[in-house]
Amino acid sequence: MKFIVKPFQIVYALYAMLLFVVILFVVTPFVLIASLFGKIGGGNVVMKIAHAWADVWLFLIGMYHVRVVEQELRKDQAYVFVSNHNSYMDIPQMLKAIRQPLRILGKAEMGKVPVFGIIYNACVVPVLRGSAEARARSVMILKSVLNKNISIYIAPEGTFNMTAKPLINFYDGAFRLAIETQTPIKPMLFLDAVNRMHWKSVFALNPGKLRTVYLEEISPEGYTPYDVDKLKQKVYELMEKKLVEYKASWLTTPHPL
């Protein structure tokens, strides 16, 4: 059966990638125009363009977003959004999941990709992990963004979780930022992204649902900069527990809580 299905999956993946590139070229002129209106106003328009891009692309490749709400978002509240990360589909899913003013913390290297980098640089706060100076500059930008009531999205694992565990270790950044700006953390779970596109290969792409679970927000009130590990552990344990409850597909063996 696998030998019969695989050629169709390859054709589907090529179709999805071609559509991705075509839509990219279509929206790029609009991104360039929006970028002329500054980092804030222009950036907000670019994010709306990115939302439309995700809507069109996911629809045309047969993927649909499903919201599983344990606690709803507050519309006028800026958040530090965090999620698990084990697929390139996390970004399109995140664009479906968060429909409010937003900036993304991402790797600076991605901004060098031809054409794609134009959009990436317009809506992402880039960070060079190997440079302390660059990281400090990114933190200052993120604080400025939050002060303008614009949410940020960070994948605290920092790289793909390629294990059978619910999560890998979190970096401190999202939690330190939440404490220093007193911005609530909104954890989300992306349950199906790795099923739609496994991290091993783009040719594992296949249509279907993308469920986002919106967990309860966690307030940083009462935490000090010395409590980063404590807040980080609280968020980690909540997300770990819920990934087990929702039977995330990459958990191949029972995980003790």
Image: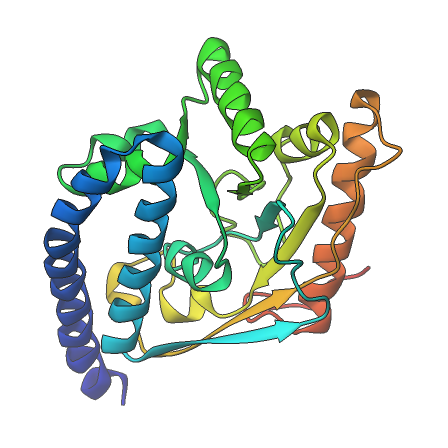
Residue pictured at 71% horizontal, 25% vertical:
180
Compared with 222, 53 (above or below) is below
Residue pictured at 28% horizontal, 34% vertical:
37
Pick whichever, 245 or 257, lies toward us: 245
Residue pictured at 58% horizontal, 34% vertical:
146
For the N terminus, which image quadrant? bottom left
For the C terminus, which image quadrant? bottom right
x and y percentages locating residue 48 in the rendered image: 35, 54
**Residue 165 visible, this orientation:** no
Compared with 164, 124 (above or below) is above
Pick whichever, 229 or 106, lies toward us: 106
Compared across the picture, whether 120 is left or right of 211 comes to left
Compared across the picture, whether 257 is left or right of 160 comes to right
Q: Quadrant of residue 64?
A: bottom left
Task: Tell how many labels.
Answer: 0
x and y percentages locating residue 158 in the rendered image: 51, 38
List the single residue furthest toward the top. Answer: 133
Compared across the picture, whether 12 is left or right of 88 comes to left
How is the structure coloured here?
Answer: rainbow
**Residue 67 visible, this orientation:** yes
Compared with 210, 215 (above or below) is above
x and y percentages locating residue 43 in the rendered image: 35, 39
Compared with 245, 49 (above or below) is above
x and y percentages locating residue 92 in the rendered image: 37, 59
